[in-house]
Amino acid sequence: MHSNWTLFAASASHQAPLLERALARAEGPPKCSLAEHPGCLKNVELVGFRPAPMTVHRLLVVEDDPSWQNCLESVARSEGCDVTLVSDGEEALKRLSEGPQARPDLVLLDLLLPRMDGWELYGRMRVDQQLRTIPVLMLSSMVTQEPKLGGIVGFLHKTHSPEPVIHQLRERLRGFSDPTVEPAPVGTYTVHLPENTSLLLHSLPAALRQAVRMHMYRAAELLRTGLPMMSTWLMALPGDPPSLLVTVEGVRLVLEIDEAACTLTATSLIIPAYLPRM
């Protein structure tokens, strides 16, 4: 039977009418009648069937710039969202930890924040059994590519004019679908950035600094999967304890692995002399 519809495992007995019509449109008669064989509906879903987008009822906006706060809040409220505004990662983490009833459907997270920045908050959420299920929409003027990391459902690039961001945010809210977020697996690594390394990292230009942070969390995700630790930017270093070497545009960061505590600690940051400092 030739058909544009493909069946695969899921639970969708309520989709029987849709399935009947799809099979009726296929070339030739169906090989079985769903009415005669109701068991066929068990664990079946139509790949071509797309559920309606979900509504973001509660949105947590983590942004320290008042003008951007007002802009983002106005757009989200016009789309029917209940908006909570916070100015830094520490305040956001406190709000997120208040309990299930207060947790948002989506977090709109700026990366450059005072006290606890966006990357640190993202890392804290990813190692928390409850908070890792909350999708994150990132926002920054410094990062130019969408981070390919778990839990991140999109990226908005800040521009001098807010109109492009307004348009993108409105589209995201209208077309939002809750991703399937896996439970925290055994061996999820926490990334620890000591104060001395953090200060040195902050001497880099903002865009490069954000790129290094993104690769740190990518390394943590790859480490727990057991994939080979060798690529153009990531290398496993033998030793006791073992370490990872992350290289981004000439900047080299050594992450020491503590398997018992499931932590990655930045122990060394080497910045080439030719790179500008802030």
Image: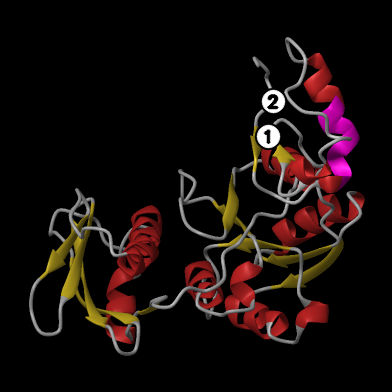
Residue 81 sits inside the magenta stretch: no
Circle 2 SS class:
loop
Can you tell which quarter of the image residue 244 is in? bottom left
Crowding around mark 2 (Cα neighbors within 10 Å: few <14, some 14 to 19, many 20+) is some
Question: Is 126 positioned to the left or the right of 187 in the image?
Answer: right
Q: Residue at x 80, y 44 (%)?
A: 53
Q: Is residue 180 above or below residue 130?
A: above
Q: Which residues are magenta?
A: 14-20
Q: Residue at x 76, y 39 (%)?
A: 171
Q: Position of residue 42 (x, y in %)?
A: 75, 49
From where the camera sits, is residue 62 visible? yes
Instruction: Characterize the magenta stretch by its predominant secondary structure.
Output: helix
Q: Mark 1 highlights which residue?
A: 47
Name the residue type under label 1. Val
Q: Residue at x 68, y 85 (%)?
A: 97
Whole-angstrom CA distance, mark 1 to mark 2, is 7 Å
Q: Nearer the viewer, residue 35 or 71?
A: 35
